[in-house]
Amino acid sequence: MPRTTAPPLRRLPRLSAALLTGTLLLGGLAVAPAASGATAATTAVRVNQVGYLPDGPKRATVVTTATQALSWQLRNAAGTVVASGPTVPRGADAPSGQSVQVADFSSYQGTGTGYVLSVDGSGSVPFDIRADLYDALRSDAMAFFHHQRSGIAIDASLVGAAHARPAGHLGVSPNKGDVSVPCQATVCDYTQDVRGGWYDAGDHGKYVVNGGLSTWLVVNSFERAERAGKGAALGDSTLRVPERGNGVPDVLDEARWELDFLMRMQVPAGKPYAGMAFHKVHDAAWTGMPLRPDQDAQPRELHRPSTAATLNLAAAAAQCARVYRPYDSAYADRCLSAARRAWTAAQANPAMYAPSSDSTGGGAYEDARVTDEFYWAAAELYAATGESAYRDAVTSSSWHTSADAFSPYGFGWADTAALGRLVLATVPTGLPASDVARVRASVTAAADGYLSRMAAQGYAVPVPADGYFWGSNGEVANDAVVMAVAGELTGDARYRAGALETMDYLLGRNALGLSYVTGHGESAAQNQHHRFWAHQLDASLPHPPAGSLAGGPNSGLQDPIAAQRLAGCAPAACYIDHIDSYSTNEVAVNWNAPLAWLAAYAAERASDDGGSGGEPPASACAVTYTVTNSWNTGFTANVTVENTGRTAVDGWQLTWAYPDGQRVTSAWNATVTQSGTAVGARNTDWNRTLAPGAKASFGVQGTHNGTNPAPASFSLNAGACS
């Protein structure tokens, strides 16, 4: 989490192992230095330490000064060579400061455990090749959010004894609360109940701008899985949450914990700036380390509302209104009401910016450009309601046609225009087909840029050489989200391969030969900056739970430990697994959210039917047929079909029969054909997908013989509609 003022550090004895800032030569191969708490990279063959999917890309990077191609051999657990070939020399890799070659063994599609890739006498760490490779990470990465919950006891039955803890910030001594929090001086003269939500990172702060983005990604992971017909893997009783068994997908239960908090941060009616969202809540001063949340005795403060926070609330709540409706319509209505109020308040206060100076006790999360948040929120509100006011806000925004919506650095809490594009590219709306095609083309163009950058680098990283800043691992995962969506839109396997290859980087194929995800990989980070997961400071406290993503290399070196021990590092090697290196090794919800999204995506298998065990059930649907104009022997009618089921419909045909000889002569927003009395309407490309609760509308013009009764029944994909 970016800060301008550092939290207090607990000084540690100097480490016994020398920390080098250059590279070591091991057997003629250059090896990056290791950081405290991580096993040194004893091999120059850098692989995804968890492994590879049988049908996915399988590449490794070899650190070497050799300029000629080398031979690689893939051995199974018995030591038998099962594949071999030559490496491809790549030479100098600027971000890592290393000379590298690449070994590509993608053609091998056998499965098993304990594989080792050997190059020029050096062998990789053992890894697996199997279809269920990412099942555990899918669960662990999502469990991170439950661990980070505020205002609820974290129970040992769900997380294990080591990570269990009492509820934090519920007003139980020594906590001062989050149930009745005052504002900073001059901000307001009342208190607000802002309990719940997720602790943002390694501290005890809760931030609306980061919470909105993270919630959107968590919910979007379910949306995407539903569109792919794989939503069952994130369904009820699939994750470690206390709400298991309530008939609601567990991933939505988890996101609701944060959504409830975001809505509690909205300024009440009758108060100044009603409908706006307070920017953040945290301790009055930086919280010391180590410290369990329930032991935090500091006063808590609400910080003044901001336009950016308000629009994050509007976007996340509007998304909630769409996605939660099949499971809890009353909650969806509550979300939509909050989103509408936030939008109206933001329009009335379009330039309330969080100041960069507000960084005592918590990150400032300053953002003086919020046109992108307006675009994102408008896109979500339009997708949720179909209303022209929100459509006009979308189409009049400069971001709707800007070439910069997807920046070279992807998207993030301060750059959200890309989220608006992703919504409009994947959720059916009433935008013209040409608009939808252009938006979708922008997604694939961004993904093409990431693929090009990966192809030009020895470690296949989608970020530019100057992109190793605070939270670079989150940036990598966000780029993978864009590539995965591009694959969904086009069916082009290149994008899936690119998204999967980013996982290789996060799990060990990188300049340090280190997995940045706790508990996943033979040499994995384990001392992330966190006040409770602080084993490095206090042996009675736990290491971070499996599935926690470190912020990653940061050439800014914005903490004393990094500045002291990483001076002169190459950008991709500016990382140390030390609890006090908050600028390289903190955890945060906005980094774990794309990791969880990506893990769920990577865990899906082509043969997986989503748990149904057979053919998918007929679509549940509701149809409204309205004659909009009628004259002599002619008429026009509007037809709206709604997906009332719990799974997405990808490609639809609506059928009906006219009871009195009506004939369709033309249609719009659907392809309509007629044979006798039977009529069929097929989706266009832009409205082919109907998420749960989504609607598609189209129109027909026709003739009649003096009477024009409406059709008696409709069927969607052969399933009867109500």
Image (cartoon, rainbow, N blue to C red):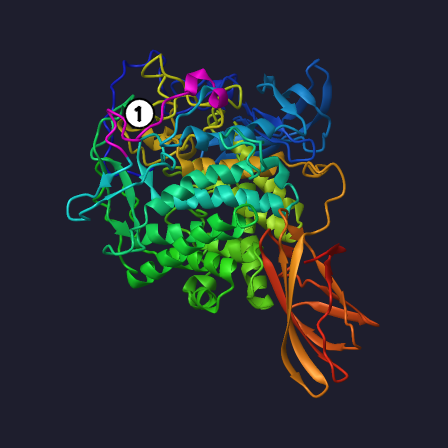
Name the residue that disc number 1 marks: 294
- Quick one: 388 or 72, which is closer to the camera? 388
**Is 173 in the magenta?**
yes
- Quick one: 127 or 258, which is closer to the camera? 258
Q: Amino acid at mark 1?
A: Asp
Q: Residue at left 43%, top 51%?
A: 334
Principal secondary structure, stretch drawn in magenta: loop
Q: Residue at left 52%, top 24%?
A: 520
- Tell me if I can see residue 708 in this picture: yes
- Quick one: 520 or 259, which is closer to the camera? 259
Where residue 712 appears, x then y in whole percent? 73, 67
Where residue 540 appears, x then y in whole percent? 35, 12
170 sits left or right of 445 in the view = left
Q: Give the SS element for disc 1.
A: helix
- Quick one: 418 or 515, which is closer to the camera? 418
- In this rendering, the answer to whether 341 lies above or below 411 is below
34 sits left or right of 461 in the view = left
Magenta stretch in the rendered image: 157-177
The image quadrant where one finds the C terminus is: bottom right
* Residue 129 placement: quadrant: top right
**Is 137 in the magenta?**
no
- In this rendering, the answer to whether 48 lies above or below 354 is above
The image quadrant where one finds the N terminus is: top left
688 sits left or right of 211 in the view = right
Where residue 200 appears, x then y in whole percent? 36, 36
Where residue 163 appears, x then y in whole percent? 42, 20
